[in-house]
Amino acid sequence: MSQLIACKTQDGIVMGADSKAVDLDANGNLIEFKVDRLHPLSKYTAILNGGAAAGDGMCQALKNFTVEENLNYVDEIHQAALPFMASEYERYMRKQCEVQPIDPVHQVSFILGGYTPKDDRFQLYLLWTQRKLPLLDSDEIGTAFCIPRVIKMEHRLNQMAIQNAGLDDLMTTVRKGLEELAGINDEISQPFNFATIYKDGIQLL
């Protein structure tokens, strides 16, 4: 239903996502459409949303919140994002359960990434739905991560990071990886969205 890829090095972060989404209509039928799964939250931070299309609205709400609270860097945004997104997800699920039962199509996942100047480092965080809905949890990502997991891609990006590959080369690998996955998996489709995060801010590609 979506494909997210992210990788960090000491020089920055690369992110990529497809745009396919599915949901259930009022009659319980599966419908397909496109969503933007890459959301800049500030000059130095962005978030990818996977799974349920409702994640798009949750990310937009988080962006409005970060602007209102003047949050810019990934460490401070992460502290606020988990309780905020958990609240947004609970609100979504309560509304959803009024019309139809909980379905796996309603689960969401996020990759939050950005720069922290006080530590002079880049960070990636995974936020996902626990088995016991509607709770969210999070973990810091070491180097590379895909949702759904693509171990071959994660291994390739990890090896490139160890070898001090540049962000341009990493982005080329992410781009080619998404194209290859779309060619063999009809649950992944264009348009793709990409971003690179440097110390001086985000560049959307």
Image (cartoon, rainbow, N blue to C red):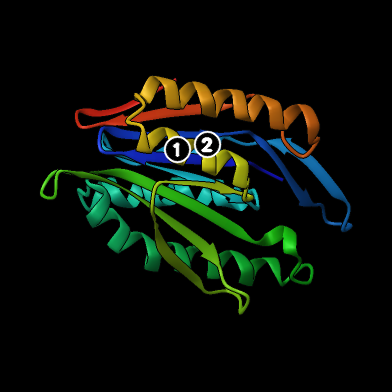
Q: Is residue 51 visible?
A: yes
Give the amino acid type for the residue marked by disc 1 in the picture. Gln
Helix, strand or loop for disc 1:
helix
The label on residue 36 is none
Label 2 Cα neighbours within 10 Å, binned few <14 / some 14-19 / many ≥20 = some
User: What residue is at 38 percent from the left and 68 percent from the top?
Assistant: 83
User: Where is residue 30 drawn, in percent x and y?
Assistant: 85, 49
Badge 1 is on which residue? 159
Using residue 194 as the reference point, say whether residue 113 is left or right of it.
Answer: left
Helix, strand or loop for disc 2:
helix
Badge 2 is on which residue? 156
User: What residue is at 62 percent from the left and 50 percent from the top?
Assistant: 149
Question: Which of the 4 quarters of the picture holds residue 47?
Answer: top left
User: Where is residue 4 drawn, in percent x and y?
Assistant: 56, 42
Identify whether 12 is placed above or below 123.
above
User: Where is residue 11 drawn, in percent x and y?
Assistant: 26, 32
Q: Nearer the viewer, residue 100 or 128?
A: 128
User: What residue is at 49 percent from the left and 63 percent from the top?
Assistant: 88
How many marks are shown on the rendered structure? 2
Q: Tell me how far mark 1 sits from mark 2, CA to CA.
A: 5 Å
Give the amino acid type for the residue marked by disc 2 in the picture. Arg
Label 1 Cα neighbours within 10 Å, binned few <14 / some 14-19 / many ≥20 = some
